[in-house]
Every structure is written in structure tokens, then in C-alpha cells.
Amino acid sequence: MPTDPTLSYDDLKTAIAGSAAAFRLTLKLEAVSPKVFPPTYEGGKYATEDRNIGGQKVPCVLLDSVPSQANRMELALQDAHDGGHFKLPLVSVNFSAVDNPSIPKITSLQAPHRIADAILRDSSITEDKKTTKFRESEIGKELNNLSTGYATPLLQYAPHCLVFGMWDSTGPRGGLGVKFARALVSEIIGVNAVGGRKTSSRIDPLNIRVNSGPLYEAKGGGWTLDKDAATKEKNAPKKLGKDGKPSEANHGNVTPTISDGGFTIDYAEQTTVLSLPALRRLRFPAKGGEKSTPEGDNAARTYLAALGLLGATLAVEAGYDLRSRCILHAKDAVTWHLLGKPGEADKAFTLDKAAALKLYNDTLAAVQKAQLPLHLEEIILTPSDDLVTLVKKSMELAAAEAGTEG
């Protein structure tokens, strides 16, 4: 049986320049454990709905949403970039001043609103030995002029924003800031989902009894049994938490409980779609107000398509450990289908990590040949003093709350 061809630069370029609709990846996944736990939303609810599958109404549950999938793909791109596997325009904020190893820096791949995020907005850049607020810098001012007809600044400094979407709601225009719709969307659902029950309990090896207290808030933090060492409230020792029970300090047994939780499913399914019309709407003139060229536009669009396919491929190969008690496994090979113009049969292509990296690098070279700007050296910003102070204060409050709970 002949194997499907690997997606090449010529295949992708032809698809972008033509009238094909999309690249689509559909993967059937199996649950590693008999039961999966989807994400919960407001009120501890799961996102369940009936879907039409094979002409039948089938109960389904959302296992990973479109925004979550985008974040996983961006994380996969960040990891590959950090590993030196490819070059990509990035803007980052150096948080070494916070002295917290968990956040040495935040990049435009990691920030929730990407390059338009408030973290970058509240940082500064040094240009010609002069420090300027990021959105008041030459780069930041370019972001103020963005539109689908002038997407060049994002191509130059944060091309992933054109793939995964962006809303400049934190910029000078607020809610009226420019919006770029997602060109790449992906989600994972559980099919034929049957809701289950979950239990919770804790047995304390010290067998501390509920009436062993009361516990009081200690003057130096934490808790104490000594009234004289406790903080005072209205001239009386202040009880820990609501009533000073040992459980307020995470001691003692927890009564077993039972509640709704988790699902059994027949299988999970991931659907990823890269919209080619969404990319074709973008124009890349050298400057705002000028006219772009078909050659330059197609080179940039092909590059963005390759970037999206690379992110999706890297995320697939990273696996599907979505959260605690929700691990999935793909058994079938990764096959992308090109949905052509009406009347054309779909074309199947394979794409693994090595091929996706080659495809990306080929399109990168084409963009550079078209003399479109790509800033491949990471731009490093410095957080404002107020932002650093805000982060430090939040860390101190979190530590204090943890100490009280513990």
C-alpha cells in the first residue's frame, strides 16, 4: 500500500497561492486510563454537549479547548526555540529583578495576549541608548498601525500572533484595538461520554482529632496552640481560619466525600484546522499605506502556514498529558488533509517534526528572499519598577497565605 507523501514547500506554496480551503488533521486518541477528567469551568461544571457523529446524536465532553490547544502549541514552539531547533521572532521581558527562578522571563509566546499583553505594555526597551516604554517605542508605535492590510509589523516581530490570533485590547485604543482572528484552531473532545463519580478523603497518620485545638494565628506566621503567642483581635487571641480546627492547618482526617466527576469515553478525537482564506486576507506591504506585492504576500502567508503546522506537529509529538488523570495516546499516524477547491479530491500528506522543521526553514528562506522583514534576534524588554514591585508583593502575599494554610 503506497504511503502518503510528505508535505513539501512546493505543495504548501501552491495551496496558499491557489484556492484550497484548509489543512485539516483528525486524530483518534485513546484514554490511557479507563476514566478521564476534563477541565472544569465556572461552578465546577464540565463542558458537555451532544454532537452529530455519523448521523447520530452522541454525548460528548470537551477535553481541551481551542485557547488551551493554542497555548500548548505555543509552548511546544517555545521549547523547540529554546532548544535551538529553529529561529523565530520573539519579544521577551527579563524578570531577573524579581529573583524568582520560576519566571526568569516571559516571552510573546507565553504571554496570554501575546505581543499585545499588559506584561509587555508595562515594560520598556532600550533604543539608541534611550529607554522608552515599549508601546511608545518605534516597534510599539508600529503595532498601533496594524490591520489585515498592513500585517507586516507582526510578521517582523511576532508572526505567531497572525496564526493563533490577537486582540490589542491593552493598547492605546483599548477595546477598539485591532483584532486578528485565529487562522489555526484545534480542540479535543471525548466521544460517547458517560459521566462518573469521584471520591476524596484523607487519613491523617498522626490521627489528630478535630477537638485537639483550637489553633491560633501565630505572631510570626503559621499557627500556635499558645494563646500568649497568638496574634490578637479585639484583645483576644485570633483563631486560625474560621474556627481554629486542626484542618485549618491541614492536619487531621478528612471525611470521605462523593460527588460527580470524570467520564468514561469510547475514544477522544482531536480536530485541527488551518484556514487558508484567513491567511489570504493578510497583506504585507513594506510600509503602511503602500501596496504589497503578490509575491511578498504569498511568501509571508506560506511562512505563517508553515509556522502553524510546525506548532501543531510539535504539540502532537509532545504527547497528550492534558492534566491530572487525563492522559491520551494517539495510535494512528499523523496525516494532514488538504481540502482543495470544490470538486477536487482531498490530498493527504504526512508531516513529522523533522519534515515540519524543514518546511518552516524553507518558507523562512523564501520570506527573506522576498526581502520582507523578520527580526530573528530576540528583543528583550525590562519590566517597569511598578510591575516588578507588583510581582514581588504578590509573591509575598502568596507565601504568607501558604504559611497560614500550612
Image (cartoon, grey):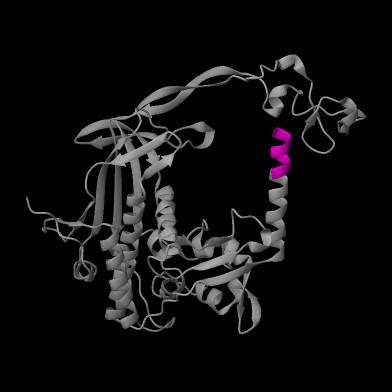
Give the residues in magenta: 399-406
Quarter of the figure with the C terminus: top right
Residue located 37% across and 77% down the image = 284
In the current view of this chain or complex, which residue is farthest to the front? Answer: 205
Instruction: Work out whether residue 259 can be spotted.
Output: yes
Residue located 69% across and 44% down the image = 398
Residue 83: x and y in percent read 43, 62
Question: Relative to residue 210, is residue 123 drawn left or right?
Answer: left
Residue 127: x and y in percent read 60, 81
Residue 403 against residue 205 in the figure, above or below? below
Residue 256 against residue 183 in the figure, above or below? above
Q: Is residue 241 magenta?
A: no
In the current view of this chain or complex, which residue is farthest to the left? Answer: 1
Question: Relative to residue 216, is residue 287 drawn left or right?
Answer: left
Residue located 36% across and 58% down the image = 311
Instruction: Work out whether residue 165 can be spotted.
Output: no
In the current view of this chain or complex, which residue is farthest to the right? Answer: 235
Question: Relative to residue 241, is residue 339 drawn left or right?
Answer: left
Q: Is residue 401 magenta?
A: yes
Residue 215 against residue 184 in the figure, above or below? above
Which of the two residues, 360 or 190, is positioned nearer the viewer here?
360
Residue 173: x and y in percent read 56, 67
Residue located 91% across and 28% down the image = 228
What's the magenta bit mostly, secondary-structure-wise? helix
Which of the two residues, 355 or 127, is positioned nearer the viewer here?
355
